Image (cartoon, rainbow, N blue to C red):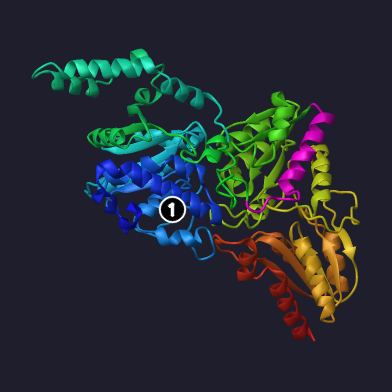
């Protein structure tokens, strides 16, 4: 196999050009085989195989710097930089990350994980290079989906002022996670289909090259001219009008064509954008047919593409999806907003049933929140569905555009808590802290699937900003018999007995129930309260817990700083009771990728660890 000859960076340069197609095929088969076992981002990586090969052939790593936007498409890059063995433990605890990591290789020059950041980071690397009188190339690779994010345009605006080389590669597959939306997508479609432009360009260049002596000079003059014939034929020429040289489009599966384009890009003495057209999922029929499904794939059967372990029970996203469609049927003022994630957030059914009340704003969380604020100010009832770690990008908009005006926007926060294999950039472990710090915001978390439904209905009727956070994965179906009506700032008492009181929020109620059973076997009786609200906390429930127990234990799937436990501690400090408080939280640190159950064990929020800590506390009290 040709892959056997790739042991470190730049080894690809020893492969003969006529063998590039074979190497590309071997890489695809390798990725399909490995990801079918580990899970991971398949479609984007299959589409970027030849593009990555061309980048590694045209540039020299680690001297030259490649910044991968989001970074989920960097698997081929990892293969070509000698990390083949790492795919055995891809996205597993202490294994190789599914994203670029500086600590993993010198060839990863910048950590990524969220979208629309690569041009800003690349621009910083360019300035650092020039200030230090270095001469390497800097290449930012960004997808057309990430180009819908406003941060990308802020960076392009700055990059347009450069008088030094900076290469931006637009990997255009017309698919981000779900189908691209908006004006950027339409603009790129116009360029993709501008056959007239391509034909004229090729014809003019070929004719001029046939002119002895002067043909080459004329071509160079055309290339250097700001008002080239592109402006006459391709509508808008947005990038050129900004001051960024535009090259392309070029077939992203034609390595020789891309090599020629990259060599030309190196010679440009300003920011240059190379527009590369690729096919997401290329080379694997199931991924070509269902690119959204294979964006982040679970382990699957290679022959059929069907997940190896089909999901037989509903997850929280499914529950949210069902409730939203019912709420949409009952109230025509209910509208839904997402940021390029209709499938991932469960809003696809709502979109299909109520297309006029569904809005996918692209990868633009800040815009999504302010847009929702405008909808609320206009008299509608917006529900914004965004993953916990992605909503962090819109913190300012939540404060200024929603909460200062006390507008009734509901935030449905999926993937809250530990999410597992995607690692630090995707763990939703900060939302209780950053949301509960905001005046006028109300923060809730359901204990099970029925409570998620009840909380959504309650939130839409509150006429104030509300955030409901729920985890990834199977929706808990226990404690069905406990379904007290939702009241603002009121917890739900489940069990009342013993010297220990467990105050649990959201996903940790399930864990607390198991802890209670284990403690009972060890001879300890426990009260259990479903806290429901992090803002406002139920001070009456905390007062009762402190007055009637020797040990109060808070449990949350959030970092300690600013979380639920910290708020309980602050209130209990005002009380004059002889009671001890134990906060079970995620440590104030970033949590790497890995299986969620294993991560819980490692950071001490699993059942066994919690029980051990509680018993130690009780023994100390005695």
Q: Quadrant of residue 401?
A: top right
Q: Is residue 143 left or right of residue 556?
A: left
Q: What residue is drawn where x is 81% and y is 66%?
A: 513
Q: What residue is drawn where x is 72% and y is 70%?
A: 607
Label 1 SS: loop
Q: What residue is drawn where x is 49% and y is 31%?
A: 174
Q: Is residue 309 magenta?
A: yes
| Residues in magenta, as a range | 308-332
Q: What residue is drawn where x is 50% and y is 22%?
A: 186
Classify the position of the C terminus by image quarter.
Answer: bottom right
Q: Is residue 501 magenta?
A: no
Q: Magenta span: helix, strand or loop, mainly?
A: helix
46 over 110 or under it: above or below: above
Q: Is residue 587 left or right of residue 206?
A: right
Q: Is residue 518 left or right of residue 10?
A: right
Q: Is residue 84 visible?
A: yes
The residue identified by callout 1 is 100
Q: Quadrant of residue 429?
A: bottom right
Query: Where residue 484 appears, x then y in whole percent?
Result: 90, 52
Q: Residue furthest front?
A: 303
504 over 617 or under it: above or below: above
Classify the position of the N terminus by image quarter.
Answer: bottom left
Query: Where residue 570 appears, x then y in whole percent?
Result: 73, 64
């Amino acid at each position: 196999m040709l892959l056997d000859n790739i042991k470190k960076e730049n080894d690809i340069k020893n492969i003969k050009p006529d063998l590039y197609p074979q190497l590309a095929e071997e890489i695809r088969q390798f990725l399909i085989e490995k990801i079918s076992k580990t899970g991971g981002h398949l479609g984007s990586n299959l589409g970027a195989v030849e593009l990555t090969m061309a980048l590694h052939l045209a540039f020299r790593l680690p001297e030259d710097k490649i910044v991968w936007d989001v970074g989920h498409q960097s698997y081929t890059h990892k293969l070509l930089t000698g990390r083949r063995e790492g795919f055995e433990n891809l996205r597993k605890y202490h294994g190789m990350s599914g994203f670029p990591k500086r600590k993993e290789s010198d060839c990863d020059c910048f950590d990524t994980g969220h979208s629309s950041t690569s041009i800003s980071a690349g621009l910083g690397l360019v300035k650092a290079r020039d200030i230090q009188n270095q001469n390497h190339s800097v290449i930012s690779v960004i997808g057309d989906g990430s180009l819908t994010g406003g941060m990308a345009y802020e960076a392009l605006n700055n990059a347009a002022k450069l008088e030094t080389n900076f290469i931006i590669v637009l990997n255009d597959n017309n698919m981000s996670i779900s189908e691209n939306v908006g004006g950027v997508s339409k603009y790129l479609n116009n360029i993709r289909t501008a056959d007239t432009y391509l034909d004229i360009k090729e014809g003019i260049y070929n004719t001029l090259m046939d002119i002895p002596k002067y043909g080459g000079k004329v071509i160079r003059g055309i290339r250097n001219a700001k008002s080239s014939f592109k402006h006459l034929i391709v509508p808008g020429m947005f990038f050129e009008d900004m001051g960024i040289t535009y090259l392309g489009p070029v077939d992203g599966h034609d390595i020789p064509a891309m090599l020629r384009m990259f060599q030309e890009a190196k010679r440009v003495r300003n920011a240059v954008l190379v527009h590369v057209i690729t096919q997401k999922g290329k080379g694997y029929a199931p991924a070509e047919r269902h690119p959204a499904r294979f964006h982040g794939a679970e382990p699957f059967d290679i022959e059929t593409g069907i997940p190896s372990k089909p999901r037989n029970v509903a997850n929280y996203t499914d529950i949210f999806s069902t409730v939203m469609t019912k709420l949409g049927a009952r109230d025509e003022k209910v509208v839904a907003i997402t940021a390029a994630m209709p499938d991932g957030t469960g809003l696809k059914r709502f979109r299909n049933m109520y297309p006029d009340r569904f809005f996918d704003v692209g990868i633009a969380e800040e815009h999504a929140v302010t847009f929702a604020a405008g909808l609320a100010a206009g008299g509608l009832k917006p529900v914004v569905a965004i993953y916990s770690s992605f909503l962090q990008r819109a913190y300012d908009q939540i404060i200024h555009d929603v909460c200062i005006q006390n507008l009734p926007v509901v935030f449905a926060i999926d993937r809250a808590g530990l999410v597992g294999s995607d690692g630090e950039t995707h763990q939703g472990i900060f939302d209780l802290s950053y949301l509960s710090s905001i005046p006028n915001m109300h923060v809730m978390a359901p204990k099970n699937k029925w409570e998620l439904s009840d909380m959504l209905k309650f939130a839409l009727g509150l006429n104030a900003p509300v955030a409901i956070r729920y985890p990834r994965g199977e929706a808990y179906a226990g404690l069905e018999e406990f379904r007290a009506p939702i009241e603002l700032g009121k917890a739900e008492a489940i069990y009342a007995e013993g010297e220990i009181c467990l105050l649990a929020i959201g996903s940790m109620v399930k864990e607390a129930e198991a802890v209670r059973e284990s403690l009972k076997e060890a001879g300890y009786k426990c009260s259990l309260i479903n806290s429901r609200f992090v803002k406002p906390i139920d001070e009456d429930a905390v007062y009762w817990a402190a007055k009637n127990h020797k040990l109060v234990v808070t449990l949350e799937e959030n970092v300690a700083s600013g979380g639920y436990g910290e708020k309980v501690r602050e209130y209990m400090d005002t009380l004059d009771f002889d009671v001890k408080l134990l906060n079970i939280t995620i440590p104030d640190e970033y949590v790497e990728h890995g299986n969620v159950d294993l991560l819980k064990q490692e950071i001490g929020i699993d059942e066994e660890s919690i029980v051990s800590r509680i018993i130690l506390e009780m023994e100390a009290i005695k």
